[in-house]
Image (tube, rainbow, N blue to C red):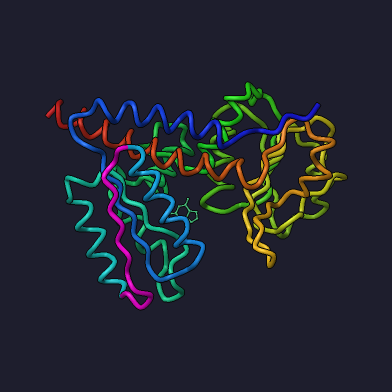
Amino acid sequence: MTIIIDGKACANKILENIKLKTSKLEKKPGLSVILVGEDPASTVYVNNKEKKAIESGFNSYIYRLPHNTLKEELLELINKLNNDDNTDGILLQLPLPGHLNAYDFLDKIDPKKDVDGFHPVNSGKLFLNEKPYAVSCTPKGIIKLLDEYKIKIEGANVVIAGRSNIVGKPLAAMFLNRNATITIAHSKTKNLSEITKNADILISATGRPNIITKDMVKKDAVVIDVGIIRGQDGKLRGDVDFNSVKDIAGFITPVPGGVGPMTIAMLMENTLELHILKISRNKSC
Ligand code: GUN
C-alpha cells in the first residue's frame, strides 16, 4: 500500500513546537524578508512567510522594494539588517528582477543571519559536512520528512532531478553526508528514465509538470515532489504525475501539502536556531 506523506501535518507539529519554545524566550526572534518587485508567486510566498512568522511568535519585518531598486540600495538595506539587533534571520526572496544578480547580494548577508543557508560560508560548510549556521530550507524539510517516516537514507540510491543552488545541490550534499549514493540529473541528462528507475529515493525539483511518470519509477520507491507550478486552471501541480505514480511508489508526497509546508516550517526553525545561537554567543562574550 502506498503511503501519502503528509507534509502539512509534519510541518504543523514542528511549528507548534517552535511556538512553544519561542514563548519561553526573553525576546522574540526576528525575521526580515526582502522582496524586490511584484513577482506574483514571490508575493504569495512572502505573505505566507509573514503569516507563519507571526504565528510562531516572531517579529516579522517585510521590506517591499520597487522593481527598479538599484544594486547600491539593496546592498545598503542588507548592511543595515546585518547590524540590526532585532533581526536574527535575513531572507532575500528570489528570483530578483533581471537587472540584479542574486550572487552580488547573497554573500553580503552575514552568514550568522543567513536564514536560507545560501551564503558561500554556509553552503561550503554543508559540503564539508561541518555544521552550517543554517541549512537551505527545502532540502532540510525533505530530509526531516524522510526521517519522520523512518525512511532509511544510509546506503540508499538517491536520484535528484534538478541541480539548482536552492534545492538540488544542497540536497545532494545532505544525502551524501548521510551516506546515500547520489545521482543528480538535469536538463542535459541522457536516458533520464533509465536513471530514475534505479532510485530507492527519487526527488524531482525541475519545475516541469508531470515530467515523472509511472514508467520511470521503481516499485516501492520513495517519490518526493518539489515542483510547484500553477496551471492555467489555477490548480497547483508538481513534477510528478501523482495519479499514476501513486500506484507504484511506496511513499509519495502530494502537491500541495507535501514539501511546500515543510519549507516554510524550516524557515521558522532556522530563524529560531539563529536567534538561540546569537544568545549563546552573547552570553559567552
Ligand atoms: N525563492 C524560491 N524558493 C526560495 C527560497 O527557498 N529562498 C529564497 N530566498 N527565495 C526563494
Residue 157 can be seen in this image = no
Residue 100 can be seen in this image = yes
Rendered position, 68 above or below 123: below
Who is closer to the viewer here, 63 or 70? 63
Q: Give the image location of residue 284, x and y in percent.
A: 15, 26
Q: Give the image location of residue 16, x and y in percent.
A: 41, 29
Q: Which residues are magenta?
A: 57-69
- Taking the spot 21% from the left edge, 27% from the top edge, the residue there is 280
- Taking the spot 54% from the left edge, 31% from the top edge, the residue there is 10
Rendered position, 104 above or below 183: below
Who is closer to the viewer here, 73 or 210? 210
- Taking the spot 65% from the left edge, 63% from the top edge, the residue there is 234
Question: Residue 60 colored magenta?
Answer: yes
Identify the residue at the far bottom of this view.
Answer: 68
Q: Give the image location of residue 28, x and y in percent.
A: 23, 37
Q: Give the image location of residue 86, x and y in percent.
A: 19, 45
Identify the residue at the far left of this view.
Answer: 285
Who is closer to the viewer here, 64 or 218? 64
Quadrant location of residue 8? top right
Question: Residue 29 colored magenta?
Answer: no
Rendered position, 128 above or below 62: above
